[in-house]
Image (cartoon, grey):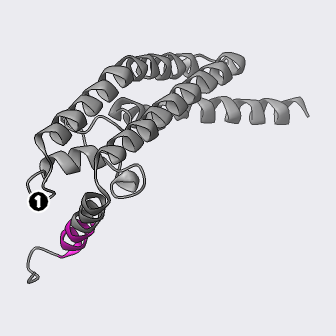
Amino acid sequence: MKSLQRYFLGSAVLAMSMIPATFAPIAAYGQAGTEGRGTKPRMHRMLGAEAPWISIALKHQSELNLTPDQVATLEKIRTLYRDQTSPIQEQLRAIEGELATSLQETPANLIQAKLKIEQAEKLRSQLRYLRVETLENGRSVLTAQQRDQLKNLASFRRHNSRKSPGQPS
C-alpha cells in the first residue's frame, strides 16, 4: 500500500515539475496589450471584443477620417494604457518566474504554488479590466459611423488574411 502511495505521490510531483517547462514559453510571451512592442497579440483576441481597436483605428486614421483631436486623444489613451500595464506585466512575469522556480523543487511547495497562481490571476484580471476600460474610452472618442467603419475594415482584413497567397482577391 505504501509503495502505491509513493508511486502516486512521485507521479504527482513529476507532473507538477513538468508544468514550468510547459508553460514557461507562454509566461515569457507576455500579456495582451503589448501590441506594437515587437510581440504579437493573442490570436483569440485579435478581432473580438478585446481586439487592439485603438491601434487599428490609429493605423487607419485616414480611412476613418479621424480628426487631429481624435488622433491625439486615442494616442493618449493608448499611452496611458501602456504606462498602467507595464508595471503589472513586470510583476506578472516575476510571479510566473517564482512559480516556475518553486515548482522545480522536490517536493514542490503546493501551498506556495497556489498563492503564486492566485497572485498571477489577480494581476491578469487587473490587466484585462484595464484593457476593457481603455477600449471603452477609445470607443467613446469615435463617432458611430467611425465605429462601424472600423468594424468593417477589421472584418475585411480578417477575410483577406484567410485567403491563401495564390488566391485572387
Q: Residue at x 42, y 31 (%)?
A: 27
Q: Classify 10 Å Cα crowding around label 1: few (below 14), some (14-19), many (20 and above).
A: few
Q: Main secondary structure of the magenta part?
A: helix
The magenta stretch is 155-163
Q: Residue furthest right?
A: 1
Q: Seen in the image, is 12 located left or right of residue 146?
A: right
In this rendering, is residue 169 above or below 33? Answer: below
Q: Position of residue 131 (x, y in %)?
A: 41, 37
**The N terminus: image quadrant:** top right
Quarter holding residue 97: top left
Quarter holding residue 39: top left
Name the one closer to the observer, 123 or 94: 123
Q: Position of residue 155 (x, y in %)?
A: 27, 68
Q: Amino acid at mark 1?
A: Glu
The residue at which mark 1 appears reads as: 63
Quarter holding residue 102: top right
Q: Position of residue 68 (x, y in %)?
A: 11, 40
Under tag 1, what secondary structure?
Answer: loop
Q: Residue at x 13, y 48 (%)?
A: 59
